[in-house]
Image (spheres, rainbow, N blue to C red):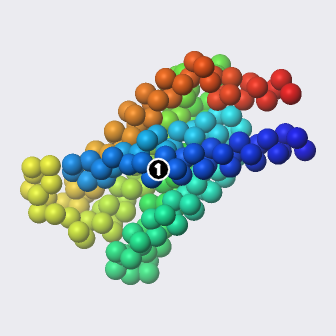
Amino acid sequence: MKTNTRKLTDTAILIAMGTVLSIFKIDLPFGGGVTACSMLPLVILSFRYGWKWGGLAGLTYSLLQLLLGLDNVQYASSALMAAGVVVLDYLLAYTVIGFASFFGGKPGNTRKALVIGIVVTFLLRLVCHYITGVWIWGEWMPEEFMGMAMTSPWLYSFLYNGWYMLAEIILTVAAAMAIYGPLKKYIHGEDLKQQ
């Protein structure tokens, strides 16, 4: 009972932290934005309690992000496109972050595992946004982007989404490495074994 209460409390706190951090966003000059490491709490949940629990936490976080970004759905020109925005830009894109420990693996509880988990899941999130960028948001593709003529939604989506997701990966990895030393036992759930 005590363990379940701790797990739920940790999860609620870390999801709340991620949601608050997502509000602090730096808009980038070519579109998109970088948050204040808003997905790092999901990564920590995944390593702390495993990828299955992390995936559930990621889904919960995605529902909160959907509520905060619900106005984005209005830009879809059909019900199918609206469903695509909901599923790909929110539900899948954020849920996949909770699988970080699946890709990073727990053996050895290393910094490398944490970095791999972040990079792989953030790249999977990028794929989700890339698909909607081509399929849905390409409709609003500008004639010029990053000083280049835009004629292909494939290139536009890659540049637009790749730009801010690369920045998000770099910032999150840097923050994870900065907190890893002092918080290692909490990230890997070693403190839970001492109870």
Residue 148 vertical placement versus 65 (above, below): above
Quick check: 51 left or right of 127? right
Q: Amino acid at mark 1?
A: Ser
Toward which corner of the image does residue 135 lie, by quadrant?
bottom left
Which x, y percent locates residue 62? 55, 58
- Crowding around mark 1 (Cα neighbors within 10 Å: few <14, some 14 to 19, many 20+) is some
Task: Determine whether the residue tagged by mark 1 lies in a helix, strand or loop.
Answer: helix
Q: Is residue 161 left or right of residue 109?
A: left
**In the depicted view, which residue is nearer to us: 1 or 142?**
1
Q: Which residue: 45% across, 35% down?
A: 172
Task: Tell me the quarter of the image containing the C terminus.
Answer: top right
Considering every residue shown, the one lying at the far bottom of the view is 78
Report whether 21 appears left or right of 171: right
Which residue is at 11% across, 63% downward?
143
Figure quadrant of the N terminus: top right
Is residue 84 visible to the viewer in this orientation of the structure?
no
Position in image of residue 155 (x %, y %): 22, 53
Residue situated furthest right in the rendering:
1
Q: Which residue is mark 1?
A: 22
Tell me where residue 111 sits by quadrant. top right
Count numbered badges in the picture. Answer: 1
Compared to residue 131, the image places residue 46 above or below, namely above
Q: Report if residue 97 is visible in the image.
A: yes
Residue 107 image position (x, y, % from top left): 66, 23
Give residue 52's position: percent from left, percent from top: 69, 46
* Residue beneath the point at 46% across and 70% down: 70
Q: Is residue 108 left or right of residue 117?
A: right
